[in-house]
Amino acid sequence: MRDPATNLDDYLRSRFGVTLERALADACAGVTTLALAHCVEIVCDPVGSYVHDDDGLSEHYQGTLAVEGISYRFRCSMFTDGGGSRFVESIEEFEIVQWGVRLAMPGGSIEAQ
């Protein structure tokens, strides 16, 4: 069975043309990825950082990501090198914490969780 991060990455790529890494990197930098703005909600909080000997910086975040009725909890690390380039260093935890189904019905919708 594939892990939730791989499944979500495939979904985001096919539906929005954005990778999970890009979405997390933008959210951790306080930027909204425009392609995801109305469909994906990402909330992240800094939980620590570490300065490397080569002037690189690792910043650690935890948060939630919600898309299509599924909520995920994640922990990730961002790395900024001495030149200012920034990328996802690692995704340590990525798990589903809530999911639900929404069915469109004539005259309204029905939600189940």
Image (cartoon, rainbow, N blue to C red):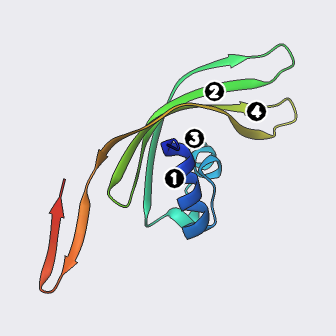
Q: Are marks 3 and 4 in contact (CB under 8 Å)?
A: no
Q: CA distance from mark 1 to mark 3?
A: 18 Å
Report whether 47 appears left or right of 19.
left
Which residue is more in the foreground, 56 or 66?
A: 66
The image's mark for residue 59 is 2
Residue type at tag 4: Thr
Which residue is more in the foreground, 29 or 91?
A: 91
Q: Secondary structure at mark 3?
A: helix
- Residue shown at 58% from the left, 45% from the top: 24
Q: CA distance from mark 4 to mark 1?
A: 25 Å
Q: CA distance from mark 2 to mark 1?
A: 23 Å
Disc 2 vs disc 1: which is toward the camera? 1
- Point out the tag, 2 or 4, that comes first from the N-terminus: 2
Residue type at tag 1: Leu
Q: Are marks 3 and 2 in contact (CB under 8 Å)?
A: yes
Report whether 110 appears left or right of 61.
left
The image's mark for residue 8 is 1
Q: Secondary structure at mark 1?
A: helix
x and y percent of residue 87 in the render?
73, 40
Residue type at tag 3: Cys
Count of numbered tags: 4
Q: Secondary structure at mark 2?
A: strand
- Point out the tag, 4 or 1, that comes first from the N-terminus: 1
